[in-house]
Image: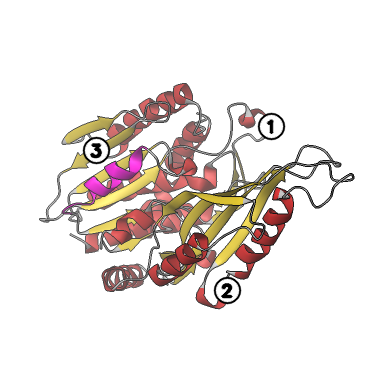
Amino acid sequence: MTLLDAARAALPSMLADLRGYVEIETPSDDRAALATGLSWLDGLVTERVGPATSSSTVEGGEFGDVRLLEFDGSAADPVLLLAHYDTVWPVGTLAGMPFAVDGDRITGPGVFDMKAGLVQALWAARIAREAGLALPPIRLLLTGDEEIGSPVSRPVIEKAAVGARAGLVFEPAGPGGAVKTARKGVGIFRVDVDGVEAHAGLDPTAGASAVDELARLVLDLHSAADLDAGTSVNVGVVGGGSRTNVTAGHAWGEFDVRVSSAAEITRIERVLDGLAARHPDAAVRVTGEWNRPVMERTPQTAGLYGIATAAASGIGVDLSEIAVGGASDANFLAALGLGVLDGLGAHGGGAHARHEHALVSGVVRQTALTAAVLHALA
């Protein structure tokens, strides 16, 4: 039996697991719900992969805990399998967006991002073992705060990468099932402007308008974008002022920056350092940080992609690659010099949207593909 045949035979069980998983809602900001979800996953992992050789937990505080499960294998260096179990959907979404399978389409909150991916990863290890294939030692890392920037899990992810041969991340696949070998870095920033209030009608020259300053800064920020270099800047939320007849004493804007290279991070930082008010009585301050580093297509990732394409070819699957603007926890792994393949999760679409869906055919393909890649890395 081929790996694709094995995945097809396991499909009813995989869909049953996925239903159980989706029907446990796990929003990033609900610690109790996340604890319930992680406990359920502990049982699923044991049932599908077997007892872990070791297990450790980092408490998430107000967010979800981070669980690291390790399994023995036949190679020297482990492979890190990374998946998050939190979703963007609040508890109660399931009532109006239930799990359902209609032909090739699977719907439900979090089914695409990224619950199907984790189910596929577990079954990939299972069917590879049942086929008698060698597997590397596996480090399975389950995180509960990816959708809000991984504030707790980032150092755990970086520690788990130490000594690993490769990182496989089960975020949704790209178009046509492409793996993601490059992602943009992301910065989330805020600009605050302090002006001087005055009566806008009686003495229009007496104050310093923070709104006027902010408007000019928005133009400066947007002009810093360089789409040819892969850099976008978007001031997405603004506010300020108190009344229409008062020169604004304060204004603010929040903005998102996406970059494709470390050089662009440096350039944007110079732009931010240079932001200044035109009016001598106004002041500007910028706060925020780079939430995720750039995931560049490094030689290590290129080599891993070569291994994966050969493994895919061996089971009759054509595997392409893509660079995307979104970021994930894969960015952290790549920044450490680890070869990373992201997008080994679901085929489908609609992440974070009401039309979120995964494809049944993709579950079969991705499970078999992951099993083949794991075996190749052994």
Residue at image mark 1? 96
**Left or right of 292 in this view: 158:** left
Regarding residue 104, the answer to whether it shows in the image is no
Choose mark 2 or mark 1, whichever is in front.
2
Magenta span: 152-163
**Left or right of 11 in this view: 199:** right
Magenta span: chief secondary structure: helix
- Residue kind at label 3, given as amino acid type: Leu
* Local crowd size for mark 1, using a 10 Å CA cut-off: few (<14), some (14–19), many (≥20): few
Q: Is residue 322 magenta?
A: no
Point out the residue furthest to the top here: 32
Residue at image mark 3? 69
| Residue name at image x 78 percent, y 48 percent | 206
Q: Is residue 159 magenta?
A: yes
| Residue name at image x 42 percent, y 30 percent | 63
Residue at image mark 2? 227
- Mark positioned earlier in the residue sequence (3 or 2): 3
